[in-house]
Image (cartoon, rainbow, N blue to C red):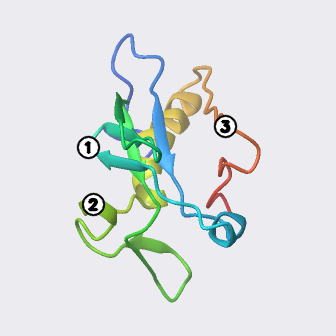
Amino acid sequence: FGFRSVFRMADGESVRVAVRVRPFNGREKERGAKLCVRMTDKATTMINPENKQEKTFTFDFSYWSHDGERTRPDGYNEPAGPGAGTDGATYADQMSVFKDLGQGVLNNAYEGFNSCLFAYGQTGAGKSYRWS
């Protein structure tokens, strides 16, 4: 990727909101956690496990990284294929997230604009998932 690529922010655009669902961690697996979210395109649907009532939210980006991946020999997780995740979701790998969000932030910073990538969430919720 070149720093002067097509990923520039549009005029007047300053905030993008994205949500990413990570895999269950060891503690969640031990406690028998149940999946209560579904993603389709930009829509994220939360499902109440008690009454199955659904609430859908729309974001600039909804990234499914809970399942549907395969691990390459170099350790990188990539999509196992379109629709390979739960409910037909396609795994969002690090490169997809970087292309959509990180590249623009990096380009703007390189061009001298103030830039910030902010991750918000509960402790242990996965904000640093796959930053290594």
**SS for callout 1:** loop
Q: Nearer the viewer, residue 90 or 122?
A: 122
Taking the spot 48% from the left edge, 20% from the top edge, the residue there is 15
Q: Which residue is mark 1?
A: 41
Q: CA distance from mark 3 to mark 2?
A: 25 Å
Mark 3, residue position: 121
Does the image show residue 1? no
At label 2, counting other C-alpha atoms closer than 10 Å, the crowd grade (few under 14, some 14-19, many 20 or more) is few
Q: Which mark is residue 87?
A: 2
Quadrant where the image shows the C terminus: bottom right
Give the image location of residue 78, x and y in percent.
41, 71
Above or below, 86 against 2 in this view is: below
- Determine whether the residue tagged by mark 3 lies in a helix, strand or loop: loop
- CA–CA distance in space, label 1 to label 3: 22 Å
Disc ID at residue 17: none
Mark 1 is on which residue type? Asp
Q: What's the amino acid at mark 2?
A: Asp
User: Can you see residue 115?
Assistant: yes
**CB atoms at circles 1 and 3 under 8 Å apart?**
no
